[in-house]
């Protein structure tokens, strides 16, 4: 039995508040490239067209042992209209909530009218500003940085975010500008539960995030695919703080995507892996699609707790409800255990049911069944419904144990391999007895004797 130790979920919570550094500037000056340089990995989406970054997107960073959060922002422009105005507003919000602002200017172009307008906005914030002269890829361009003194923000820092030139000195200056670190405190309770908001494009993920946070946290647009980066947000729902990640809509399989979409798909998969529970949004007014199925499969295969939210319920009439019930029976029959809620992010209908659903799913995800109770139940089950006879004999389940939680994992010690159908039967009865609503369940079989390559099976709930 010692081969299957119990595994407990541990969450690393940094002591005290982490300072925030906002990276701002007009479109296409290299803000996301600089963010990638600071965090030491290619995570922010970079593409040689303006406007790829649309929301304020936080990343964890560390330099010389000091942890901080760096926030990537969309391009700021004065007098912006429509979606560009929403993007600029997100950049201004990032400035307001930051401890230090890194203002990026393209040294190969020099100070523009937009840069000068941005300086006025930054001065109104009364935040410390570090002026970065980016794209100084050689010594001649470094000399051009001198002209940026005219912006009145002090000494320009010539760097090349792409090649790393001057980035170490810049990081030293950023640390110097940060507020003093808080005193070290004892470890407290774990941090907010991590929730991934996932779904195909334009099902209302950003609208739901804005609804539950009661403010404009993410840019919302009727055009599908407005969100490219995952956006982390701390949200209070039903008296509890949750960490939401609003992710890019999954349009295609990762290996079929390219450019911006490829990296966005990778990070959406990463957001699911980093979460504890996923809210999969489906458009209740439209048929359940192959894209929806793909998102659900991704969450189940990652072993995360699951809540399915049928959004846009305000658009559902009696006819649509009739067909939706049939679609659920047909398309979601492999995950009958998923918790379902019918909501409208637009009107706020039943959004208050989301937090209780998340709590139920997480409780199931971390539920542990005592070994005695598990085996007492299993003995009664197998006596009432033994395994079918195969080849003149029927394998028996000798003993069972729960090997772990998050998600619940069970090991059945048997006299031989079990039929896949019988494993599904055991899982169905396990759920009927012990619940596990909203959580996948993994059941693996460990035969007592070696019976060749087929002697061990595994089923996913």
Image: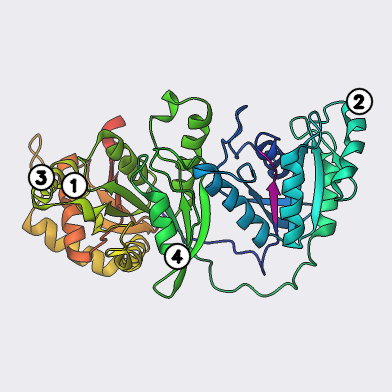
Q: For the point 52% across and 33% down, which residue is it?
A: 263
Which mark lies nearer to you, 1 or 3?
A: 3
Q: Residue furthest front?
A: 79
Q: How many other residues sit within 10 Å of disc 4, few (<14), some (14-19) or many (≥20)?
A: few
Residue, disc 4: 214
Q: Nearer the viewer, residue 50 or 353?
A: 50
Q: Based on the displayed image, in which of its 4 quarters is residue 169 positioned?
A: top right
Q: Position of residue 333 (x, y in %)?
A: 16, 45
Q: Based on the displayed image, in which of its 4 quarters is residue 6 positioned?
A: bottom left
Q: For the point 50% across and 39% down, which residue is it?
A: 228
Q: Nearer the viewer, residue 141 or 404?
A: 141
Q: Position of residue 397 (x, y in %)?
A: 20, 52
Q: Is residue 23 magenta?
A: yes
Residue, disc 2: 140
Compared across the picture, whether 347 is left or right of 166 comes to: left
The disc, 3 or 2, on the residue closer to the chain's N-terminal end is 2
Q: For the point 21% across and 51% down, which residue is it?
A: 315
Q: Secondary structure at mark 3?
A: helix
Query: Is the residue under label 2 in contact with that under label 3 (CB below 8 Å)?
Result: no
Q: Based on the displayed image, in which of its 4 quarters is residue 402 positioned?
A: bottom left
Q: Secondary structure at mark 1?
A: helix
Q: Secondary structure at mark 4?
A: loop
Look at the magenta stretch and give its main secondary structure. strand
Say above or below: 77 vs 259: below
Residue, disc 1: 424
Question: What mark, if any, has residue 323 been given in the picture?
Answer: 3
The disc, 1 or 3, on the residue closer to the chain's N-terminal end is 3
Which mark lies nearer to you, 2 or 1?
A: 2
Question: Which span is picked out in magenta?
Answer: 21-26
């Amino acid at each position: 039995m010692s081969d299957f130790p119990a595994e407990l979920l541990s969450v690393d919570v940094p002591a005290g508040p982490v300072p925030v550094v906002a990276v701002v500037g007009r479109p296409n000056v290299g803000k996301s490239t600089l963010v990638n340089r600071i965090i030491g990995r290619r995570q922010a989406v970079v593409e040689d067209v303006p406007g790829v970054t649309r929301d304020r997107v936080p990343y964890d960073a560390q330099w010389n042992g000091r942890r901080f959060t760096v926030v990537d922002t969309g391009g700021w422009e004065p007098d912006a209209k429509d979606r560009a105005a929403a993007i600029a507003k997100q950049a201004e919000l990032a400035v307001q909530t930051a401890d230090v602002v890194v203002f990026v200017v393209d040294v190969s172009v020099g100070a523009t009218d937009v840069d000068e307008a941005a300086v006025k906005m930054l001065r109104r914030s009364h935040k410390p500003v570090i002026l970065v002269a980016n794209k100084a890829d050689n010594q001649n361009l470094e000399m051009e940085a001198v002209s940026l003194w005219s912006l009145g923000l002090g000494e320009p820092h010539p760097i090349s975010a792409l090649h790393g030139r001057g980035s170490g000195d810049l990081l030293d200056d950023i640390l110097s500008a940060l507020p003093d670190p808080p005193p070290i405190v004892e470890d407290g309770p774990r941090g907010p539960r991590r929730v991934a908001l996932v779904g195909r494009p334009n099902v209302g993920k950003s609208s739901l995030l804005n609804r539950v946070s009661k403010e404009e946290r993410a840019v919302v647009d009727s055009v599908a695919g407005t969100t490219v980066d995952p956006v982390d947000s701390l949200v209070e729902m039903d008296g509890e703080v949750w960490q939401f990640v609003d992710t890019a809509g999954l349009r295609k399989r990762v290996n079929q995507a390219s450019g911006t979409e490829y990296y966005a798909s990778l990070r959406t998969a990463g957001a699911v892996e980093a979460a504890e529970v996923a809210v999969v949004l489906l458009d209740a007014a439209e048929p359940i699609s192959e894209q929806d199925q793909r998102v659900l499969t991704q969450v189940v295969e990652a072993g995360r707790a699951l809540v399915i939210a049928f959004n846009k319920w305000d658009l559902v009439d009696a006819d649509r409800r009739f067909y939706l019930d049939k679609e659920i029976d047909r398309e979601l029959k492999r995950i009958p255990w998923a918790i379902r809620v019918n909501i409208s992010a637009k009107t706020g209908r039943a959004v208050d049911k989301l937090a209780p659903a998340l709590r139920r799913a997480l409780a199931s995800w971390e539920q542990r069944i005592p070994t005695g109770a598990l085996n007492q139940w299993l003995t009664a089950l197998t006596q009432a419904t033994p395994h079918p006879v195969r080849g003149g004999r029927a394998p028996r389940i000798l003993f069972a144990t729960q090997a772990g939680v998050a998600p619940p994992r069970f090991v059945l010690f048997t006299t031989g391999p079990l039929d896949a159908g019988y494993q599904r039967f055991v899982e169905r009865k396990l759920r009927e007895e012990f619940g596990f609503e909203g959580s996948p369940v993994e059941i693996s079989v460990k035969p007592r004797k070696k019976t060749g390559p087929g002697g061990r099976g595994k089923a996913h709930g």
